[in-house]
Amino acid sequence: MSKPLTVGNQVFEFPLEGENAGWGSEVTDWAEAVSDALATVQKPNDILLTTASISNTAITDTNIVGFSFSTAEVKAIECRYLVTRITTSPALNYSEVGYIEGYFDGTNWGYSIRTTGDAKIYLSILPSGQVQYRVDNITAATHIGQIKFEAKVINNT
């Protein structure tokens, strides 16, 4: 007896515990199909959802930790991000969601940024592939800022 497992539109008859030998090719085919399917979920150099701190004093370009791309491997990027900056005295809440689309031409990154909202933040990409930010300083007693980001890439190979 077997259990049917579906990957995409393919059905694989997977052996149950205690089944006799002889299922090797079916199990291998299933494992290859799962690996191929997972490669569409996360490819090498994709960035899964990541959170980094945003400083209120970053009035010059500052690296965003974990938000960079290999110029040797990545040809194009599609990123989503959310920035929140909250202050007290006065109580303010700035938020911004955005999309970065770009490509590496072998020397520099060409990119565009579309935003909704205004968190008083400005993003850029260095030729090295490092994403940076700078902010407008918000005069307040305390500041808590963060950026959440994720990226899908198209690799050279």
Image: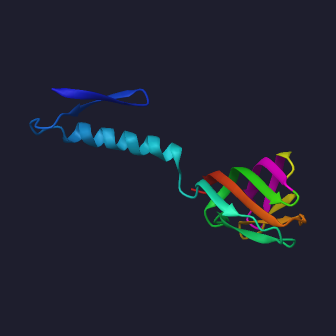
x and y percentages locating residue 57 in the rendered image: 83, 72
In front of the other: 61 or 96? 96
Quadrant showing the N terminus:
top left
Q: Residue at x 68, y 54 (%)?
A: 148
Q: Nearer the viewer, residue 60 or 27?
A: 60
Residue 106 sits inside the magenta stretch = yes
Pick the quarter of the image with the C terminus.
Answer: bottom right
Q: Residue furthest front?
A: 89
Image position of 28 (left or right of 43): left
Is 16 drawn above or below residue 134 in the view shown? above
Q: Residue at x 85, y 55 (%)?
A: 91
Reply yes or no: does residue 109 show up in magenta: yes
The magenta region covers 91-115
Q: Residue at x 79, y 57 (%)?
A: 85
Residue at 81%, 62% in the rendered image? 124
Q: How does the figure colour the protein chain or chains?
A: rainbow
Measured as percent of width and height from the top left, residue 101 is found at 75, 50
Classify 31 as above or below 65.
above
